[in-house]
Image: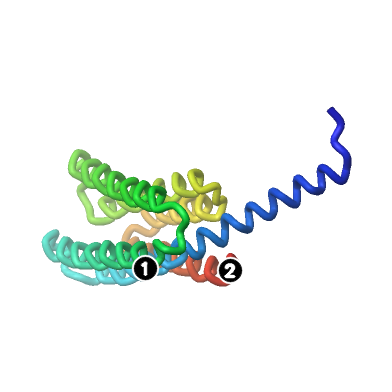
Amino acid sequence: MEISPQDARKSLDDVQRITEQTRRVLASGGAPYYLLLWGAIWLVGFTLTQFVDERAWVLGMVWGVLDLIGAIGSAWIGFRLSQRVRSQIMSVRIGLFWLALLGYAALLVFLSRPDSKELIALLIVVMAMFGYVAMGLWLNSAVIVWIGLGVTLLSLLGYFFLRDFFSLWMAVLGGGTLMASGWWMLKAWR
């Protein structure tokens, strides 16, 4: 079967149009707002982790409060933007995916019994970034995949080469990458 240059061009234009529509749906569906919210939580949480008393209950309280703020903020974003998203079923599935991933991350940390706050953080970050990669693949968004891979790589570099400053590294580069990505999506995908 021969494809004419005009048919090939039309097909490429269709692919480009669908890609742009997908990006607009992701941007209006809340992806950048989630990135901004969780980037800010990481920025605050990891900064406090670097400087707060190392007792587990203190860090547990800090992250517990921040995660609660993140969960409430995520639910609010989802509720506010649910009218913009065409598929409520997809929104519920995405929410359930992240809830399941959170449960598995908690189980992984419990079972592995890490011996430092840095290793606990690394395990949780790697699981979260696995979630980003999976979401990117599921939603056909290379940008989200690259965010997940990039933050994973930065996390590993910080853990292995800057352990004394790991939490600050994660605050600036982990949280900063999430926030910058959300900001970029808001500007570039509209």
Mark 2 residue element: loop
Number of marks in the rendered image: 2
Which residue is depicted at the point 56% across and 62% down? 24
Q: Residue at x 56, y 50 (%)?
A: 142
Between 1 and 115, which is closer to the camera in this rendering?
1
Residue 80 shows which numbered tag? 1
Q: Residues within 10 Å of mark 2 (few under 14, many from 20)?
A: some
> Label 2: which residue?
190
**Location of residue 43 in the rendering, given as x and y in whole percent from the top left corner:** 35, 69
Q: Residue furthest top?
A: 1
Amino acid at circle 2: Arg
Residue nearest the observer in this picture, 34 or 26: 26
Three-letter code for the amino acid on which mark 1 is drawn: Arg
Which sits earlier in the primary sequence, circle 1 or circle 2?
A: 1
Q: Position of residue 69 (x, y in %)?
A: 25, 68
Depth check: give the residue in front, 90 or 117. 90
Count residues near mark 1 (Cα–Cα under 10 Å), then give few for <14, some for 14-19, many for 20+: few
The x, y position of residue 113, in whole percent, is: 18, 43
Residue 49's quadrant in the figure? bottom left
Residue at the (53%, 59%) spot, across then down: 25
CA distance for labels 1 and 2? 18 Å
Classify the position of the N terminus by image quarter: top right
**Residue at 69% of width from left, 53% of height from top?**
16
Task: Determine whether label 1 and label 2 are within 8 Å by CB.
Answer: no
- The image quadrant where one finds the C terminus is bottom right
Q: Secondary structure at mark 1?
A: helix
Nearest the eye: 33 or 133: 33
- Residue 117's spot in the image, x, y percent? 23, 56
Number of the label disc, if any, that sits on residue 1: none
